[in-house]
Amino acid sequence: MTAAERSQILALMAQGKPDFKDDTATVRENFDGLLATLPVDEALTFETRTIGGIPGVWVDGAQGNDRVLLYLHGGAYVVGTPHGYRSLSSNVAKEAGTALFSPRYRLAPEHQFPAPVDDALAAYRGLLDEGYDATSIAVAGDSAGGGLAAALLLAIREAGLPQPAAAWLLSPWADLSCSSESMRTKAHQDPLLDAEGLSRKAAEYLGEAPADSPLASPIAAELHGLAPLLVHVGSHEILLDDAVRLVARAGAAGTSARLVIAPEMFHDWPLFSFMLSEGREALAEVGRFLAEHLQAARYEAPAQPATTLS
């Protein structure tokens, strides 16, 4: 990342950076405005589909629709839409060689925990009901969507359903207590998030549920028996420890998990892949990971669990 690239991105963030300390209506307006500035591949056709009773955005795969990415968008459980995040989600699907379905899960404070988990699980069941084998489904999500993707894997396990082929978590918000050390030590480096704002939105989402509920904060869950994980996080994020602890706990539980800490990167940096080389590199890496696991899950025996920190 050049100094010019960083200055451009920080200026873009400053134009519509969401401050989660604001009331939700204001955050939604600013957040949607920021997402609207992100370029989208005009060659793609974005359709509205309902799967498992959950509406969302669908994109056909360039190589067919036999494999699909279930993408869960970010937004602290209170903002964001599949349409707003279509730039990032479609880029991931394109790199992985899959079709895309990004569900419009319900948001707080109108719909509190566990509504998003229920909707994500309904969408996953819907894909199975449409004839997709679990090994032809990959799961991904960023920020709150990354935490939700981890919660979805837990919900899939508890429901007795087969795990998807693999999952990618970008900058996952996995501890809604907002008490990790990096919330404090990285506060001066993170240009997008702050602990106070996240704590306020966590309270709106949780309602009466405790912050350590496993499906709200996967860091508190037993993480055995989950799909292979790839987790990306930036070294300048207040959510750094969420990712590190999640991967460590998953690996210790026998789940294949790999962590990539990107030097000097900020929250959700692949959103800016159109102007950031590190974003393009991350997308290429996740594309390879998902494609390899989708291929291996269909034609090869699963690998033994392993944990790699890089």
Image (tube, rainbow, N blue to C red):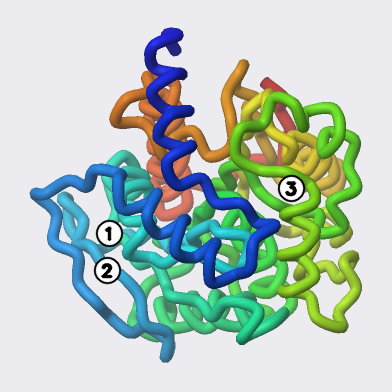
Q: Amino acid at mark 1?
A: Ala
Where is residue 117 drawn, in percent x and y? 63, 76
Q: CA distance from mark 2 to mark 3?
A: 30 Å
Q: Earlier in the sequence, mark 1 or mark 3?
A: 1
Of tags 2 and 3, which is closer to the observer?
Answer: 2
Q: Is residue 8 left or right of residue 239?
A: left
Contact (Cβ within 8 Å) of mark 2 with mark 1? yes
| Residue highlighted by disc 3 | 255
Q: Please rate how many residues cluster around mark 1, counting C-alpha atoms within 10 Å: few if below 14, some from 14 to 19, many from 20.
A: many
Of tags 2 and 1, which is closer to the observer?
Answer: 2
| Residue highlighted by disc 1 | 99
Task: Locate the C terminus and report the quarter of the image it occupies.
Answer: top right
Residue at x-position 35% and y-position 75%: 56
Q: Amino acid at mark 3?
A: Thr
Where is residue 136 drawn, in percent x and y? 40, 61
Q: Earlier in the sequence, mark 2 or mark 3?
A: 2
Where is residue 157 drawn, in percent x and y? 70, 71
Task: Locate the N terminus and report the quarter of the image it occupies.
Answer: top left
Residue at x-position 24% and y-position 43%: 39
Contact (Cβ within 8 Å) of mark 2 with mark 3? no
Q: Quadrant of residue 237?
A: top right
Q: Amino acid at mark 2?
A: Trp
Circle on res. 13: none
Vertical order, 245 against 56 (above or below): above
| Residue highlighted by disc 2 | 58
